[in-house]
Amino acid sequence: MNTHPVGDSALLIDTHDAMVAQHLRTYILRQSLKGLRELVPAHNTLLVEYDALLFDLTSFIRLLPKFEQLKRPAAPARAHDVPVTYDGEDLKEVVRLTGLDMAEVIQRHSSATYTVAFLGFAPGFPYLIGLDPKLRVPRLKTPRTKIASGAVAIADEFSGIYPRATPAGWCILGYTDVVLFDPDREPPALLTPGDTVHFRPSA
Amino acid sequence: MITVIDPGNLTSFQDLGRVGYAHLGVPQAGAADSMSLRHANLLVGNAEGSAALEMTVNGPTLRFETDAVVAFAGGRVEPTLDDMPIPMYQSIAIHAGQTLACGAILTGIRCYLAIAGGFSPNPTLASASSDTFAGLGPPVIRAGDRLSCETHSLHQGWYLRSPPEFPDEAILGVIPGPHADWFTPAAFEVLSGCTYVVRADSDRTGLRLRGEDIRREKHSELSSQGMVTGAVQIPGDGQPIVLLSNHGTIGGYPVIAVVIHADLPRMGQLRSGAKLRFQLVSHEQALAALRGSEAALHAAVASADSGLLAARRLLVMAKAHPGLRQACLQLERWRVNVRR
């Protein structure tokens, strides 16, 4: 596994797969490493943040080949239905970028089966893979400083849902009422990596 | 109990952050200038990561309904207690009924107020850090709020030997980032040669900078991935965004460089309009700087008897009085062993 230093207190590991990143996180947690601060799995990577004055980076890197020899159990997955009102502020821009008409953008976005690849950016924000390749659009050149909560958006190969009003760099297709994160709930996040999601257009 | 008479511009509870939930997308948050938070706590005898008030641009006015011991650290303020000036960077005894006005932050942008025993806001996910981005932790304080705290008066007092300064021009050490190969050598020349200005739309999630564009060599979209505080991201428009403590856990803009850990606290003190330059340093230099700043933290906090603390308070009061100011300056010239 390739690793890249991220400043003086973090390391980025190429996992080439979202579920491998999740498994690698579980594996590293089990080692009870001194000075480990945070493990952030993503689409192709796992970010390891540590206290540079406590963490033994050399020994840590030696652990990685052992992980690659381990068998990874399949985690139980759940299916979720998410109702969406397709009235987002970037719908027209997506129509322009893709050359599809509006009905077709909505139809293609809501007929796919998405898998939760990882959570991040904001609490409970799911990065969903399985987007129709015809809907692949870039992120906004200048991110919006604030959007309303429940925004269902696309960027690159992902679809996602903004759990609350935050800055946003993705193209917004519509909005949902689903509560994605509640710190008083156990687990706090509605979606878990590996779960599947369907978007249902609502009137 | 403490009553908020005026909340100031943006005053929130902060500690050293919400660590261990980033895999759910929960930002770390915590004090933007963690070193000043730690200073403030050590000056009142608290554990260095206790929750304290982080004030921004303009501090709050608070009425104490209980005896307490407090300390200020961070961006320079000229606080008053019942209209009498009091110094920063030392423990200050407050009596029930007194009013503490923190006032404007004159250098830097954030100042921290710690209380001996600690504020006791309700924690969320193991941290009392107020995260306005994710909506977690206690809310930003408002007029009329009553803040609970575990007060105890101290027999011992502390002061800081050499308070840090937060000028509006900073040089931050950086290490080339994980996507350094997305950029040409010319981009690194821009990064380390250009003076950037902190834009007004900066906040606790990041410093948005204005300056010469940094051009990418690779134009494909970056795979979304974990981000660290101090990451210098380059969006499509070429204007850098440096992530602060309340940044989102995942980002999709390439990271040309990362600010070294030792310089993160100073980065959290840069206000709108401040000038900023990046200086490339080696990994070894970064670690040496971090060891240095950690060693300096505890060495700088010195215990003081009540006589010295009182003398420091008197000096600040006297300096606010036009006639006595000259006498104070003369005293300082005579190297009387009382520091500002």
Image: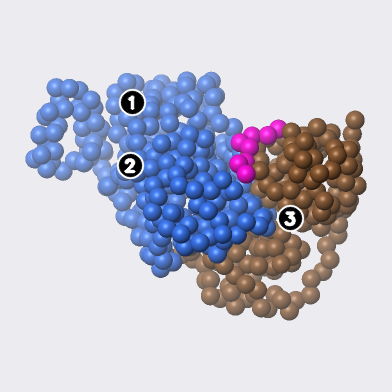
Circle 2 sits on which residue? B167
Chain containing the residue with disc 1:
B
**Would you identify the image quadrant in which residue A38 lies?**
bottom right
Residue at image coords 45%, 47%: B212
Can residue B326 be seen here? The reply is yes
Image quarter hosting the C terminus of chain A: top right
Q: Is residue A145 magenta?
A: yes
Q: Is residue B334 left or right of residue A96?
A: left
Residue at image coords 29%, 26%: B85
Decide which of tag 1 and tag 2 comes sooner along the chain.
1
Can residue A179 be seen here? The reply is no
Residue at image coords 53%, 20%: B144
> What amino acid is labelled 1 in the image?
Thr
Which segment did they paint magenta?
A141-148
Circle 3 sits on which residue? A118
- Residue B44, percent from left and from top: 39, 42
Depth check: give the residue in front, B45 or A62: A62
Disc 2 from disc 3: Cα separation: 41 Å
- Residue B80's disc is 1
- Residue B299, percent from left and from top: 31, 55
- Residue B168's disc is none
Depth check: give the residue in front, A147 or B43: A147
Check disc 3 and report its element: helix, strand or loop: strand
State which chain is coloured brown: A
Q: Is residue B64 left or right of residue A101?
A: left
Q: Is residue B330 above or below residue A11?
A: above
According to the rendering, which colour does chain B have? blue
